[in-house]
Image: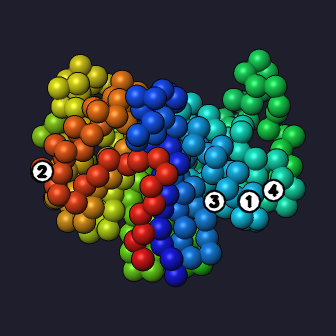
Amino acid sequence: MTFALTFWGVRGTIACPMSTHMGYGGHTSCVEVMAGSHRIVLDAGTGLRLLGKRFLKEGLGRATLLLSHTHLDHIAGFPFFAPAYTKGFGLNIIAGHCNGNPGIEAVMARQMERPLFPVPMRTMGSDLSFTEIEAGSSFPLDGGVMVRTAPLNHPDGATAYRIEFAGRSLCYVTDTEHVPGKPDRNILGLIQDADLVIYDSTYTEQEFTCKVGWGHSTWNEGVRLCREAGAKRLALFHHDPDHDDESVAAIERDAQENFPDSFAAREGATVTLA
């Protein structure tokens, strides 16, 4: 009944393959969740490529991909996800922000069409399926996994996920912009009493004042939300590409002074919940 997660990509906006960023990681958003026999992937950023290699090595036969949204930094790894080219591998892609206009399948295919990419999605040999849900709905996955969702405040829409398994809960809340002084009730309801909240901590509060409308939040707001909701741990996520390792470490220290059970998400790190 293992319930654990591994960070394969923790960066926002664009991959940062520089030596100054390797301490926390340069790949964009991708988190692997192991819930018993079920494997769930949160977002398909550039970190998905290395995760795909791990899946092949393990001989994994199927997985579920939950997309927060389809801005490029969250789907750029999909064309390089080797299991998707493997006959017999099953991948169900779920999203809650498209509303069929266009649908999630069309969006994922578009980035693999010429002149953007030389290999079209239709040539992938795996069993791909696409499911659109309404943000705010709940649905079960195999093996006793329950998923709850909430809409987020982000350009073009985004969806937050709460994964419940073995009496524990994990929340993935990125990309979202808060309104100062007005806690997001959708997020508060989703993260209530959660064991771990992965939260969009792209900006410092000083940076946020110049980035209103860009669709991202701060570690300070993550702390405020976790305190009000009674969440146990907070993972700072979606690190700004302009934040090198020294900057992220300073943000982590500031967050821990205010919420001791917080940490900056680090590529390759595993957190066990049950």
Q: Amino acid at mark 1?
A: Lys
Q: Categorize mark 2 by other alpha carbons within 10 Å: few (<14), some (14-19), many (20+).
A: few
Which residue is the site of mark 1?
57
Task: Give the spatial CA distance, label 2 vs label 1.
Answer: 41 Å
Q: Which mark is residue 273?
A: none
For the residues carrying marks 3 and 1, which lies nearer the camera in this image? 1
Q: Categorize mark 1 by other alpha carbons within 10 Å: few (<14), some (14-19), many (20+).
A: few
Residue 212 falls in image quadrant: top left
Residue 41 falls in image quadrant: bottom right
N-terminal-most mark, 1 or 4: 1
The answer to whether residue 65 is above or below residue 158 is below
Secondary element at tag 1: helix
Q: Position of residue 260 (x, y in %)?
A: 17, 57
The residue under the point 22% across, 37% down is: 250
Position of 172 compared to 93: left or right?
Answer: left
Task: Give the spatial CA distance, label 3 vs label 2.
Answer: 35 Å
Q: Which mark is residue 258?
A: 2
Q: Nearer the viewer, residue 93 or 97?
A: 93
Q: Amino acid at mark 3?
A: Thr
